[in-house]
Image (cartoon, rainbow, N blue to C red):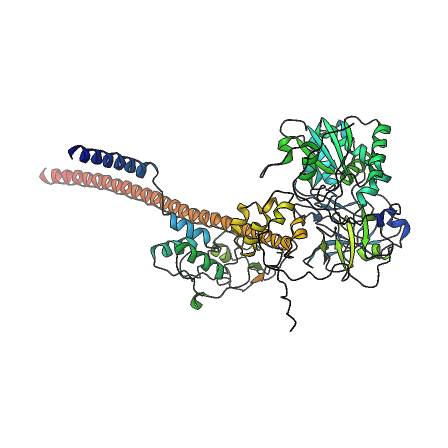
């Protein structure tokens, strides 16, 4: 009886020590859930979700303070992925946060630009180059299409242009074949 | 002379239909046809970055003049196909299934067909890097159909030399005979090109693999090797089975080496070039001629199928017009019936990838019978030359479970079409793989764009934070400085007050003394 208790106690101590060691040795830094959610979000940094960037929104979702359908650039597919990750039901995009649009980039109409640098300060990914009283221009490959530069421009010289499909970005369609109608 | 050959798994034996276009010699398109009204030369004709235009509308160009400069190292130059005037640099319809346009240089020929000054490249006295640059600037890309820039492949690899250089003259795709005819008519250029490649890659042996349904080509190439006394070059007839002309399949047949998933043939000391590419490398280095034309087959629903040497940018229908397309023709396919792509229009230009213009009709390619459910019979797996499980790839591509499709090595699929060819349920398997591959690429591009955006956003936040801290530190330093100054001033004024007080005291003392006295 006593020996059995001792064996069990010893086992408990050894396993406990192993678990304790593992908890220290393999400690996970940060919140892995936030990283995963942040990985799904499109990183537009547009703030349409009501948070000042994708990561704060990810943190809010992880804390359960924000719903998963507040990201218009991520669209339906993003919501589906978030729902899969969090084991929730997917739901349609919430209307108050905006609508899903075609991917586009900001373009500065250069003969209207007065060089005020306000858009440069607004761009969350530093994708606009220029200097005071010099013409500004958008680095198209870095632009996330967040539209944050439109608002501060005092002369409304920034327009959003949808990204056109090119031979390189063209995708093969899902094979769709007509179902043969059975003759009566 | 018998060499032990190996076998690749799978493959099919479709009807070859090659005889029709073998009747007549290769015709130079310029010699037999009227000059096209314009040449539309797409700038992006190879794998890699699109070249940037070097000419403007209105400029005159000469034949062989550089009109598209390579964009970085993974790119290849583009040259004017004939002399004339640049009409425009604009978006034109591409020979691509999408029906989209891309930047092209449109040249109006002056009829003189005048060469730009060119001279042989002294490649023997150049460093390997300089030879690679020369090939890149000559626009040499793989002519087997994949149009991969050749200069990136002319590399002896990590061990400093290749064991085997494979020259691919298998030409396994039905209807296409351009390599066959080139081997028969221009064997010397191919052998000399192979010898150049042998020297550049320090290959121990060169094996030129030709399918045994081309006995004339094999005999002529062997005679050429003997005549030119080319060392360490051997012509090997390989069994005819589609796709023996796939690079990995031919390497397997000739050397027995199976290139594993995620590896390259150079990891095993083997590299593979097409016979046409070998000839083009010879032309580029020994004659100094950039790549401005290629040999292509016109076959299918035409009265007189034939091979032509055609300049890039020639409209496809100008070439087909020489062969007499039958009235019921309704489509052009670039490539063969197994791997070819349907063209969006008949006027699209011939490009470096155009090894064949297959003219088709409804009778020749009847609409596919309706797709039936997959019963997992496994015929596709037996036919797959890449040893994949096509039915699994099909399931996952169809269900859009792309991660799983990648786990089953979707990207090892060479889209040869064997699986769809044998499928008893008429499933267009390759269409599903192409769909899945382009979706995965698009997602990966999006992902990397998102990662860049995240990085830049975080950097911006860090920079703003740093700026704030620096500003605070600067302000604090300044405040401390002012405080010190103030304190000093106060100390100064205190000392002065003391002095004044002392002086006042002295004055008072003196006054007291005078009053007392």
In the image: residue A109, left or right of residue A63: right
**Percent position (x, y) of residue B87?**
79, 56
x 78%, y 43%: residue: B291
**Percent position (x, y) of residue B200?**
72, 30
If the image is split into quadrants, where does the N terminus of chain A sit? Answer: top left
If the image is split into quadrants, where does the C terminus of chain A sit? Answer: bottom right
Q: Is residue A148 visible?
A: no
Q: How many marks?
A: 0
Give whichever of A94, B237 is nearer the camera.
Answer: B237
Residue, far right = B31
Q: Is residue B473 visible?
A: yes
Give whichever of A70, B166 is nearer the camera.
Answer: B166
**Percent position (x, y) of residue A129?**
54, 52
**Percent position (x, y) of residue A109?**
59, 61
Residue, far bottom = A184
Give the quadrant of residue B488: top left
x 55%, y 60%: residue: A103
x 34%, y 55%: residue: A63
In the image: residue A44, left or right of residue B135: left
In the image: residue B74, left or right of residue B452: right
Give whichever of B31, A152 is nearer the camera.
Answer: B31
């Amino acid at each position: 009886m006593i020996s059995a208790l001792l064996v069990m106690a010893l086992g408990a101590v050894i396993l406990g020590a192993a678990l304790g060691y593992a908890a220290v040795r393999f400690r996970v830094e940060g919140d892995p859930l936030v990283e995963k959610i942040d990985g799904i979000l499109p990183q537009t940094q547009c703030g349409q979700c009501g948070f000042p960037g994708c990561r704060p929104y990810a943190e809010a979702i992880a804390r359960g303070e924000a719903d998963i359908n507040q990201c218009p650039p991520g669209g339906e597919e993003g919501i589906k992925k978030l729902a899969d990750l969090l084991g929730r039901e997917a739901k349609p995009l919430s209307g108050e946060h905006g609508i899903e649009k075609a991917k586009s980039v900001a373009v500065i109409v250069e003969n209207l630009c007065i060089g005020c640098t306000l858009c440069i300060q607004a761009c969350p990914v530093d994708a606009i180059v220029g200097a005071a009283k010099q013409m500004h221009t958008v680095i198209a490959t870095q632009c996330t299409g967040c539209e944050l530069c439109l608002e501060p421009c005092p002369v409304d010289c920034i327009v959003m242009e949808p990204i056109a499909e090119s031979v390189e970005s063209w995708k093969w369609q899902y094979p769709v074949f007509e179902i043969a109608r059975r003759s009566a | 002379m018998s060499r032990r050959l190996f076998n690749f798994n799978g493959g099919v034996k479709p009807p070859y239909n090659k005889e029709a276009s073998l009747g007549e010699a290769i015709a130079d398109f310029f010699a037999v046809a009227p000059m096209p009204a314009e040449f539309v030369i797409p700038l992006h004709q190879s794998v890699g970055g699109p070249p940037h235009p070097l000419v403007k509308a209105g400029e005159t160009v000469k034949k062989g003049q550089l009109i598209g400069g390579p964009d970085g190292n993974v790119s290849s130059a583009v040259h004017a196909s004939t002399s004339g005037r640049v009409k425009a640099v604009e978006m034109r319809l591409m020979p691509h299934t999408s029906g989209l346009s891309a930047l092209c240089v449109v040249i109006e020929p002056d009829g003189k067909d005048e060469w730009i000054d060119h001279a042989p490249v002294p490649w023997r006295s150049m460093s390997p890097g300089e030879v690679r640059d020369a090939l890149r600037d000559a626009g040499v890309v793989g002519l087997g159909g994949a149009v991969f820039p050749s200069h990136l492949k002319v590399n002896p690899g990590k061990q400093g030399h290749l064991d085997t250089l494979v020259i691919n003259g298998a030409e396994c795709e039905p209807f296409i005979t351009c390599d066959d005819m080139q081997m028969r008519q221009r064997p010397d250029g191919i052998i000399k090109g192979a010898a150049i490649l042998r020297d550049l890659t320090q290959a121990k042996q060169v094996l030129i693999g030709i399918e045994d349904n081309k006995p004339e080509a094999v005999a002529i190439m062997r005679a050429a090797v003997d005549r030119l006394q080319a060392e360490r070059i051997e012509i090997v007839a390989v069994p005819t089975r589609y796709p023996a002309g796939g690079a990995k399949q031919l390497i397997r047949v000739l050397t027995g080496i199976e290139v594993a998933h995620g590896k390259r043939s150079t990891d095993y000391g083997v590299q593979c070039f097409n016979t046409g590419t070998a000839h083009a490398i010879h032309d580029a280095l020994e004659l100094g001629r950039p790549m401005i034309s290629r040999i292509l087959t016109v076959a299918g629903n035409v009265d007189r199928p034939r091979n032509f040497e055609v300049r890039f940018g020639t409209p496809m229908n100008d070439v087909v017009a020489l062969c007499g397309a039958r009235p019921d023709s309704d489509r052009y396919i670039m490539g063969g019936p197994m791997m070819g792509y349907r063209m969006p229009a008949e006027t699209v230009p011939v490009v470096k990838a155009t090894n064949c213009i297959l003219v088709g009709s409804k009778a020749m390619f009847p609409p596919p019978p309706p797709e039936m459910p997959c019963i997992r019979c496994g015929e596709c797996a037996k036919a797959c030359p890449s040893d994949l499980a096509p039915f699994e790839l099909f399931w996952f591509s169809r269900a859009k479970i792309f991660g799983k499709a990648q786990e089953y090595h979707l990207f090892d699929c060479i889209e040869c079409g064997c699986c769809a060819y044998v499928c008893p349920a008429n499933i267009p398997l390759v269409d599903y793989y192409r769909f899945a591959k382009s979706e995965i690429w698009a997602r990966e591009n999006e992902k990397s764009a998102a990662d860049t955006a995240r990085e830049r956003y975080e950097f911006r936040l860090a920079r703003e934070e740093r700026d704030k801290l620096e500003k605070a530190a600067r302000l604090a330093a300044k405040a401390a400085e002012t405080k010190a100054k103030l304190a000093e001033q106060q100390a100064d004024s205190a000392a002065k007050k003391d002095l004044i007080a002392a002086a006042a005291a002295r004055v008072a003392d003196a006054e007291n003394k005078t009053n007392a006295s």
